[in-house]
Structure formats: structure tokens, C-alpha cells
Image (cartoon, rainbow, N blue to C red):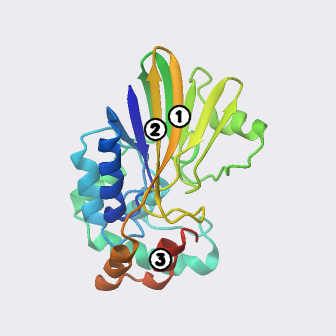
Amino acid sequence: MKAAFISDIHGNAVALEAVLADIEKKGADKIYVLGDICYRGPEPKRSLDLVRSLHTEVIKGNADEWVVRGVRKGEVPAPALEMMNREREWTVAQLSSSEITYLEELPSQLHLEIEGAEVAAFHATPDSLFEIVLPHADDETLLTKMMKPDSAQVYVYAHIHRPYIRYLNGKVIMNIGSVGLPFDGLAKASYGIVEITDGKVSTSIERVSFNLEKVVQLYEEVNYPNAEMMTRVIRNGRI
């Protein structure tokens, strides 16, 4: 079975459409969504509509939580707090109350069995929507913070917008990067594939081009509150 994991769409429906087309071309059997669907992009509603049309398992990310209840002091750098809440208010205005309830009620983890192998998937860590574990984290951090439950063979997460794959104690941990807002300097959408056949596990990070200037244009057309900064991120692939 070939499973695609996507996350951190951030209201970038243009990138999401490109990724979904690439997933179809690669013949994935299933798509899983690891959160951060709407916030910080020009098309929050269309992004959510596309995700819901997949009729698949979806979990909550920190940005989904922010849409529901706002960004709180201490969760982001102090100078960014006011602007990020303005962005949140704009996003909420584009969504219906039922769509916000949908985000609120999303679960926080996935525990999957794929062809006899256990896969654990979560947004940031198994215990937090917000904690940051970067690609260069030491083995002990990965073992204690990320690799839960111990019975899983593959651990998949998102949140940091910087994809990587590491191998530890015979197991795989992978970050699938971001569909809508990559931060690793490559201005292409990112997602992960986990393929399990007859007990053999293979993983890959896929990068997909999308129409950057179309997204920039959309930020401007909708009068997004933080358009200048966000268009810089889109064009440069870094924050």
C-alpha cells in the first residue's frame, strides 16, 4: 500500500491542487492530512473544501487551533502577536461556524496499521500541537519526545515546514514538510509517501512545483492583512 501524508496547507489551495494531482499521478492508495489547513493563506475556505472532499482521516494542527480560539501570548514572538491575530480574524471571517466547529473537533493523532506495519502520525509531537522538534534534534530527543508509541515502525509528523527522514533503532521518523508554506529555502510544495509491501517499508519526500505568482496575486486580491510578508515566504521558501 502506498500512503501519502500531507500537511501545513495554510490556505494555499493552489499548492494543494498541485500536490493532489502529483499524488494521483504517483498512484497513492490513501491520503492522510496532518493539520494546519486554513490559516495564513489567501484561500482558507477552498483549502478546507478540498481537504474535506478527500473523505479521509484528518488531524488538528496548531494553526487549526488558532483559527478556533486565537493566537495567545507566549505562543509566537511578541512582536508578531497582534498581526497574527489580525490574520486569524480575517481567516475566521472567510469560514462558516460549522467549518470552524469541524476544525475544533479534529482529533490530534492517527494510529494506523498499513500492511501489518504500525504507523503513528501527529502534527508536532504526540503530546503537543505546538512543540518544535527540528531536523537536527539529537537521537535522545527523538526517542523520548517523538517515537510514541514504542510499538510503531514509522513516525510521521509536520509542523516545522522542513522535511527530512531519519532512521533510529530500526525505525523511521519523517517530517513531511509543508504543502503551502515551505521554510527550507526550496519554494516547492512538500509531502511524504510511505509505501509498505510484504513488510518492506519505503519512505520518500516529494517536492511539487506550483504557481507561486498566482498565490501572490491572490494575497493581493483578497487584501490579506499580512500580504507583504506572506508573499515573501511564498517566493523564497523561507520565513
Quadrant for the N terminus, please.
top left
Residue, x 33% and y 34% (percent of image)? 30
Looking at the picture, tell me which residue is in the foreground, 152 or 76.
Answer: 152
Task: Please indicate, yes or no, whether residue 45 appears anywhere in the rendered image.
Answer: yes
In which image quadrant can residue 41 be found?
bottom left
Total labels drawn: 3
In which image quadrant can residue 227 be found?
bottom left
Q: Secondary structure at mark 1?
A: strand
Residue on which the image places disc 2 = 193
Residue, x 33% and y 75% (percent of image)? 214
x and y percent of residue 37 in the render? 37, 57
- Do residues under tags 1 and 2 come within 8 Å of each other at their CB atoms? yes
Three-letter code for the amino acid on which mark 2 is drawn: Ile
Three-letter code for the amino acid on which mark 1 is drawn: Thr
Q: CA distance from mark 3 to mark 1?
A: 30 Å
Three-letter code for the amino acid on which mark 3 is drawn: Met
Residue on which the image places disc 1 = 203
- Do residues under tags 2 and 3 come within 8 Å of each other at their CB atoms? no
Residue, x 43% and y 26% (percent of image)? 112
Residue on which the image places disc 3 = 230
Q: CA distance from mark 1 to mark 2?
A: 6 Å
Local packing at callout 2 (Cα closer than 10 Å; few below 14, some 14-19, many 20+) is many
Q: CA distance from mark 2 to mark 3?
A: 27 Å
Looking at the picture, tell me which residue is in the foreground, 32 or 206.
Answer: 206
In which image quadrant can residue 215 be found?
bottom left
